[in-house]
Image (tube, helix red, strand yellow):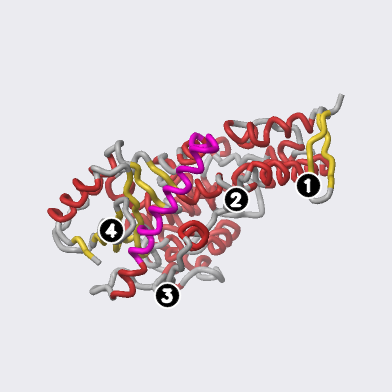
């Protein structure tokens, strides 16, 4: 189990990897105590059937630069293969503003190929590579050195089996003509917007029970302060204050430290110092925001007149179409999109791109009364109407 600890070793490995059509990649990281993930290990493997082309890269090694790896990521002649790549890509984007292109995500490909919704790596190893996977080192502190042999074995397995999984899924996509479907899905993973949290937009991630513009204005300011504070100090946002405490603060609108300390859900550390001052200032900004600059939440879907019978028929159609196509239903349309279609909306993802081909066209025909659904035994089929 070879571990790369110098820039020169990494550069030599990446130079060799660039001669191959693909390289498999995985990472181990910690995020429990930081805002940004702390990269602790990178696993890489070139095509092959043994471990000779697989290595561990120690990003914590003194003096090591990841630039040779980023050069490999920029090499468009080499496919970079990940499983469930989002968190891995965030690490590299935050660190260097780089994306591995072209990208292949086996989790996305597996959903397109009928392996279910958000299928796990262990499942694909079992079903495709026909191998067991030892997960005993899954929950471990990857920042501690030296790594044990058990940790190294676990980590390498995340890229060695991935080679066979990739080759199988890539061939299946080629056979079915669905490679473009996966590429369409991966666009969001390769967008900087996916990994950039603007403090003034952080309020949209906070769940509230009211759409009062003034209340949401205070939520916006409190969420923006929390996000900025957490980013600047690289600590988890919940270490500043949790969402339930934020909502409580927006409701009570404390004006001074005495009122602030009456908050039931606020952490002790947030009742004094910079956080306390930031909270009071954020509340005041929200209270004083002009009415025309307050948030305007999208409530359009809350007012939809959903035809429940049609929504149920769309669910049956979705199940039938996805089972026939061998695609995960969740990848096509969540329940909210089906309700939106049943209410007459047409600006939904399920009616665009490859989803329209699989489901959207028939969904619209069902809404227009041009087709019906018929059950026979265990199957549901589409029936054309005159």
The residue beneath circle 4 is 54
Where does residue 125 sit, x and y in percent of width and height?
Answer: 47, 60
Viewer-side residue, 18 vs 68: 18
Indicate which label's residue lies in the foreground, 3 or 4: 4
- How far apart in space, not on screen, are marks 2 and 1 (Cα)? 50 Å
- Nearest to N terminus: mark 1 or mark 3: 3
Does residue 314 show up?
A: yes
Q: Label 1's element?
A: strand
Q: In the image, residue 153 lies at what x, y percent?
A: 33, 69
Mark 2 or 1, which is nearer the eye?
A: 1
| Quadrant (top left, top right, bottom left, bottom right) of the N terminus | bottom left
What distance separates the C-alpha of mark 3 from that of mark 4? 21 Å
Q: Residue at x 41, y 41 (%)?
A: 190
Find disc 1 in the rendering and name its residue: 379
Above or below, 133 relative to 216: below
Mark 1 surroundings: few (<14), some (14-19) or many (≥20) residues within 10 A: few
To which residue does mark 2 refer? 215
Which label's residue is closer to the chain start, 4 or 1? 4
Q: Which label sits in the foreground, 1 or 3?
A: 1
> Could you tell me residue 151's position as x and y percent?
33, 72
Give the alpha-carbon distance from disc 4 to disc 1, as whole Å.
Answer: 46 Å
Image-based side of 298 in relation to 101, left or right: right
What stretch of residues is rendered in magenta?
155-180
State whether the magenta stretch is mostly helix, strand or loop: helix
- The residue depicted at 60 percent of the width and 31 percent of the height is 352
Label 4 SS: strand
**Inter-mark Cα distance, 1 to 3:** 41 Å
């Amino acid at each position: 189990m070879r571990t790369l600890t110098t820039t020169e070793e990494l550069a030599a490995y990446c130079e060799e990897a660039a001669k191959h059509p693909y390289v498999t990649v995985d990472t181990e990281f910690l995020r429990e105590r930081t805002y940004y993930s702390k990269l602790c290990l990178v696993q890489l493997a070139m095509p092959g059937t043994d471990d000779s082309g697989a290595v561990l890269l120690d990003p914590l090694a003194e003096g090591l630069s990841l630039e040779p790896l980023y050069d490999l990521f920029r090499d468009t002649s080499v496919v970079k293969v990940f499983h469930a790549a989002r968190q891995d890509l965030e690490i590299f984007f935050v660190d260097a503003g780089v994306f591995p292109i072209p990208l292949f995500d086996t989790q996305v490909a597996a959903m397109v190929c009928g392996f279910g919704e958000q299928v796990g790596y262990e499942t694909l190893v079992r079903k495709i590579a026909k191998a067991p996977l030892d997960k005993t080192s899954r929950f471990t502190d990857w920042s501690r050195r030296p790594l044990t042999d058990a940790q190294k074995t676990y980590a390498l397995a995340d890229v060695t089996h991935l080679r066979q999984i990739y080759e199988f899924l890539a061939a299946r996509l080629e056979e079915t003509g669905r490679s473009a479907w996966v590429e369409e899905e991966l666009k969001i993973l390769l967008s900087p917007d996916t990994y950039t949290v603007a403090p003034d937009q952080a309020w949209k991630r906070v769940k509230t029970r009211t759409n009062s513009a003034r209340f949401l204005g205070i939520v916006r300011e409190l969420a923006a302060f929390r996000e900025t504070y957490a980013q600047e100090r690289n600590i988890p946002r919940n270490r500043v204050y949790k969402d339930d405490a934020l909502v409580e603060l927006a409701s009570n609108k404390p004006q001074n430290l005495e009122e602030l300390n009456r908050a039931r859900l606020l952490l002790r550390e947030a009742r004094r110092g910079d956080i306390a001052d930031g909270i009071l200032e954020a509340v005041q900004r929200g209270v004083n925001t002009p009415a025309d600059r307050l948030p305007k939440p999208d409530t359009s879907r809350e007012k939809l007149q959903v035809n429940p019978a049609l929504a149920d028929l769309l669910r049956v159609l979705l199940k039938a179409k996805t089972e026939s196509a061998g695609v995960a239903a969740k990848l096509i349309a969540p329940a909210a999109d089906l309700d939106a279609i049943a209410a007459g909306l047409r600006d939904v993802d399920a009616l665009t791109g490859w989803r329209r081909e699989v489901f959207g066209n028939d969904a619209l025909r069902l809404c227009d009364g041009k087709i019906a659904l018929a059950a026979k035994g265990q199957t549901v089929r589409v029936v054309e109407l005159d």
